[in-house]
Image (tube, rainbow, N blue to C red):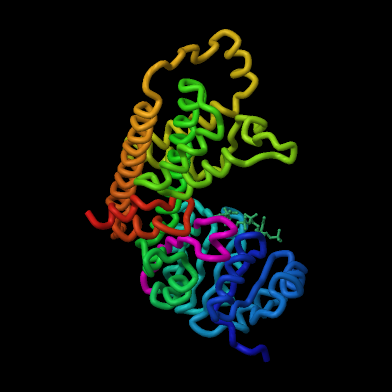
C-alpha cells in the first residue's frame, strides 16, 4: 500500500506547476507531482526535483493514495477543457472534506460552476489566481484564493508560506466565495494591461513629442521608479530601454510594435460591459492592443497621416514632471475603475470581498506590484 505522506498534490508540470512545486518543497511541504503526460513526472523527478522531498505519482489513483487527509489537489493546467477533464476524473477518487484547487487562469464563471456542482459531494473547490509568472511561482507569487470558505483554513498555512511577503505580510488572503478569486485575478490582469498602455503612451510622448534619446528615457523611468510610481512595470521599462542586442545596439526599436493577448484583459472588458461599470482605461488598453496588431493597415495609414511633426521648444524638465503626474493620476483612475468593477460584481454575486486585503495581495509577487497599493489599504 502506498504511503500517505504528501501534504498536497500538484497536477501540471509545465513552467508554473514545476516552479510552484519547488517553492512548496523549499518551504518544507511534501508535494506529490502528477501530469497528463506521465513521463514528465519521472523527467521532473530526475532533473529539476532531484535531491528534494518531492514525490511523483504514476496515476491519479496513485496520487490520491499518497495524500494526507483532507486531501489537497492543486491543478496548474491549461484553463478550460483540461481543468474540466481533471476535475471530472478526480471527483470519484476524492471524499467529503477533500479540496480541489484550480490555480490556472480560469474564467470565474467556470469556477462558480464547479463550486456549485461539487456542493452535494462535500468536496471543496477553490479557484485561485496566481500571479508573478515563472519567477513568482518559484520564489513568491501573489495568490488570490476564492471558493468554498470552509476549505481556507486547510490550505492557508501552505499558501501563506509560499507567497510573496511585503513587510512580513503575506500577499495571499482569502478573497471571497465561489469565483471571487479568479475574478480578482482577471481584474488584476486587466489593470496590468492598463498600466502597460499608460507606460507605452508616456514613452511615445517622450520619444515623438520631446524627441528624447533612449538612454535619457531610461534615466527618466529610473527616476520615476524612486517615487510614487515605484513599481515592477516601471522598473522593467527602464531595463527594457537599457537593454542592448548582441550587436551593441538597443533591442527595443527592432521589436515589431504589435501586441498579442491571452484573454484576461478582454474578459475584464467584457465583464465591465456585463456589469455596466465604466472601466474605460482597461477597455482602451485592450483596444490599443487590437489596433497595434493591425500592422499592415497602420503602415499604409502612416503614409497619409505622418503623426507628430511638432517641435517641442518648452521646458523639458517641467513637461516631464507633468507627464509623471499624468501617468500617476491615470493609474489611480484605472485602479479605482478596477475596484468599482469588483464592487459591482461582489454585489451581484453576493461575495464578501475584502478590498483592503486585495490591494495588499497586489503589493508584492504579482505583475502590478507597486508601492502605492499600500496607501489603498491604509485609507
Ligand atoms: P500551460 O497553460 O501551458 O498548460 C500546460 C499543462 O496543461 C501541462 O501540464 C499539460 O499537460 C496540461 N494540459 C494541456 Br496543455 N491540455 C490538457 C488536456 N486536454 N488535459 C489535461 N491536461 C492538459 O502551463 P503554464 O504556462 O504552466 O500555466 C498553467 C496555468 O497557469 C494556466 O492556466 C495559465 O494560464 C496560468 N498562468 C500562467 C502564467 C505564466 O506565466 N505561464 C502566469 C499565471 C498564470 P501535458 O504536459 O500532458 O501536455
Front-most of residues 260 and 164: 164
- Could you say which quadrant of the image residue 175 lies in? bottom left
Dividing the image into 4 quarters, which one contains the N terminus? bottom right
Q: Is residue 131 left or right of residue 247?
A: left
Q: Is residue 74 left or right of residue 281?
A: right
Image location of residue 128, percent across then percent down = 47, 61
Find the magenta span and give its range. Answer: 131-150
Front-most of residues 303 and 186: 303
Question: Ligand 1 is located in which of the four quadrants?
Answer: bottom right
Image location of residue 322, percent across then percent down = 34, 30
Image location of residue 193, percent across then percent down = 47, 40
**Residue at horizontal 44%, vertical 53%?**
185
**Residue at horizontal 61%, vertical 55%?**
78
- Could you say which quadrant of the image residue 169 lies in? bottom left
Residue 81 magenta-highlighted:
no
Residue 308 drawn above or below residue 353: above
Amino acid at each position: 500500500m502506498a504511503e500517505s505522506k504528501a501534504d498536497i498534490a500538484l497536477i501540471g508540470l509545465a513552467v508554473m506547476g514545476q516552479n510552484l512545486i519547488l517553492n512548496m518543497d523549499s518551504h518544507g511541504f511534501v508535494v506529490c507531482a502528477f501530469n497528463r503526460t506521465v513521463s514528465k513526472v519521472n523527467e521532473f523527478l530526475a532533473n529539476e526535483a532531484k535531491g528534494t522531498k518531492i514525490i511523483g505519482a504514476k496515476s491519479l489513483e496513485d496520487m490520491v493514495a499518497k495524500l494526507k487527509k483532507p486531501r489537497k489537489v492543486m491543478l496548474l493546467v491549461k484553463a478550460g477543457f483540461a481543468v474540466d477533464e481533471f476535475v471530472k476524473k478526480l471527483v470519484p477518487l476524492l471524499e467529503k472534506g477533500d479540496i480541489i484547487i484550480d490555480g490556472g487562469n480560469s474564467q470565474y464563471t467556470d469556477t462558480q460552476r464547479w463550486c456549485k456542482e461539487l456542493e452535494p459531494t462535500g468536496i471543496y473547490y477553490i479557484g485561485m489566481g496566481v500571479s508573478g509568472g515563472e519567477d513568482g511561482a518559484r520564489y513568491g507569487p501573489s495568490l488570490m484564493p476564492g471558493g468554498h470558505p470552509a476549505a481556507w483554513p486547510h490550505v492557508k498555512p501552505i499558501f501563506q508560506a509560499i507567497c510573496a511577503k511585503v513587510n512580513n505580510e503575506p500577499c495571499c488572503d482569502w478573497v471571497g466565495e465561489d469565483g471571487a478569486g479568479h475574478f480578482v485575478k482577471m481584474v488584476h490582469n486587466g489593470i496590468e494591461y492598463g498600466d502597460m498602455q499608460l507606460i507605452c503612451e508616456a514613452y511615445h510622448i517622450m520619444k515623438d513629442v520631446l524627441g528624447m534619446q533612449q538612454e535619457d528615457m531610461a534615466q527618466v523611468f529610473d527616476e520615476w521608479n524612486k517615487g510614487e510610481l515605484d513599481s515592477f512595470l516601471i522598473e522593467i521599462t527602464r531595463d527594457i530601454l537599457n537593454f542592448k542586442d548582441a550587436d551593441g545596439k538597443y533591442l527595443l526599436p527592432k521589436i515589431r510594435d504589435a501586441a498579442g493577448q491571452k484573454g484576461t484583459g478582454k474578459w475584464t472588458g467584457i465583464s465591465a460591459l456585463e456589469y455596466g461599470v465604466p472601466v474605460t482605461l482597461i477597455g482602451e488598453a485592450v483596444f490599443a492592443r487590437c489596433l497595434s496588431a493591425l500592422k499592415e493597415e497602420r503602415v499604409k495609414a502612416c503614409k497619409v497621416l505622418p503623426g507628430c511633426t511638432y517641435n517641442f521648444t518648452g521646458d523639458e524638465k517641467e513637461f516631464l514632471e507633468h507627464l509623471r503626474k499624468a501617468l500617476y493620476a491615470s493609474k489611480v483612475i484605472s485602479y479605482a475603475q478596477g475596484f468599482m468593477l469588483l464592487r459591482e460584481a461582489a454585489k451581484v454575486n453576493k461575495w464578501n470581498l475584502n478590498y483592503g486585503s486585495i490591494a495588499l495581495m497586489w503589493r508584492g509577487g504579482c505583475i502590478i506590484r507597486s508601492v502605492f497599493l499600500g496607501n489603498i489599504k491604509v485609507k
